[in-house]
Image (tube, rainbow, N blue to C red):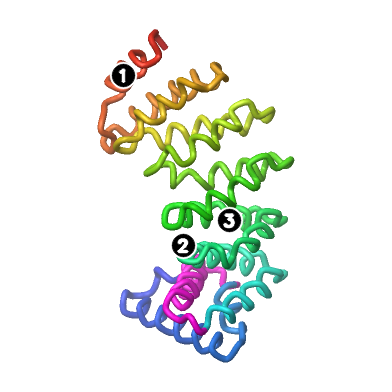
Amino acid sequence: MGFYDLSKAARENLVSEVSDAIRLDITDNKSDKLRTFASNTDTYIRKNAYLTVGRIYSDSQDLREVILKVLDELSKDADEKVRQTVAYALGEIGKVDAEKIAEMPEQALYDEHHSVRNAVIGSLKQMGEKNSKPTLEFAKRFLHHPNPKIRREIIHGVELRGRTHPEDILPLLAELQNDPDRMIRETIVHVLGQISYKKGCLEKVVDALNNWNNKELVKKALNEIIDVHKRYERFSGKSAEEVKVYIEHKIGGKL
């Protein structure tokens, strides 16, 4: 029976049991219970495990070193679900204390399993929203990594920060506007579209694109921005037609 097959009361009891078991484990300098939950086939059990680790880290300074030691051990586990849970737990910790886990997400970036690498993307997104400076510093270290998969993961990882503070990530995207990998360039176009429709972001994105030298990519990005506003019109401040008029005015010509 999965987590959401349980009644609300049963789910609340299970969350409490998971939290208590993990806290007791960590207090005793152990990782047995955490590993059990982290390897569970139910996504929501694993999620409760890494959220619990994040809460304990935030609330209990005396347990922080133990938590980091336990996560370091479990990051080498043979089960990819355990390594994935660790990557997400690092994201929770990174929201409040990114400096302490600076090197650990790097291991997960190179993980052989895609679910672990995707967890790093998710963690970077969460960290960037709450604790941007060290997260962006981490991203810059891998922005020109020789492996295009790593570069794509970094671009995805900074997207969430861009939805509220596009000025923080636009310079990073600009550095890769002429990347030789087609998928990287397409990912940049996608991210530019996603950060453009949030309130106050369109103007910053378009102003930045006016200074980019890859005019082909810029044109694709501007068309993507209009299309995103069309798809998400209920959630954006401008209609797709208003955005098209605005862009054409800013660039001084028709798209």
Identified by mark 3, the residue type is Val
> Does dot 3 land on a helix, a strand or a loop?
helix
Disc 3 from disc 1: Cα separation: 36 Å
Separation of disc 2 and disc 3 at Cα?
13 Å
Magenta-drawn segment: 39-62
Circle 2 SS class? helix
- Residue tagged by mark 2? 95
Give the side of residue 201 with respect to residue 73, left or right. Answer: left
Compare marks 1 and 2 and give the one earlier in the sequence: 2
Q: Which residue is mark 1?
A: 246
Element type at mark 1: helix
Tell me the residue at 52%/57% (across/down).
Answer: 123
User: Residue 86's x, y, as percent?
Assistant: 59, 68
- Indicate yes or no whether the magenta region holds residue 82: no
Q: Residue at x 44, y 84 (%)?
A: 17
- Asked if the residue at tag 3 contacts the one at tag 2, i.e. Cβ–Cβ closer than 8 Å, the answer is no
Q: Residues within 10 Å of mark 3 (few under 14, many from 20)?
A: many
Type of amino acid under label 1? Tyr
Identify the mark nearer the N-term, 3 or 1.
3
The image shows residue 164 at horizontal and vertical percentages of 37, 44
In the image, what residue type sits under mark 2?
Lys
Against 67, residue 103 (above or below) is above
How packed is label 1: few (under 14 Cα within 10 Å), some, or many (20 or more)?
A: some
Labelled disc at residue 120:
3
On screen, residue 2 versus residue 231, left or right, reads right
Q: Nearer the viewer, residue 118 or 58?
A: 58
The image quadrant where one finds the C terminus is top left
Question: Mark 2 or mark 3, which has the lower sequence index?
Answer: 2
Give the residue displayed 33% in from the left and 13% down from the top.
249
Q: Which one is in front in this view, the residue at disc 2 or the one at disc 3?
A: 2
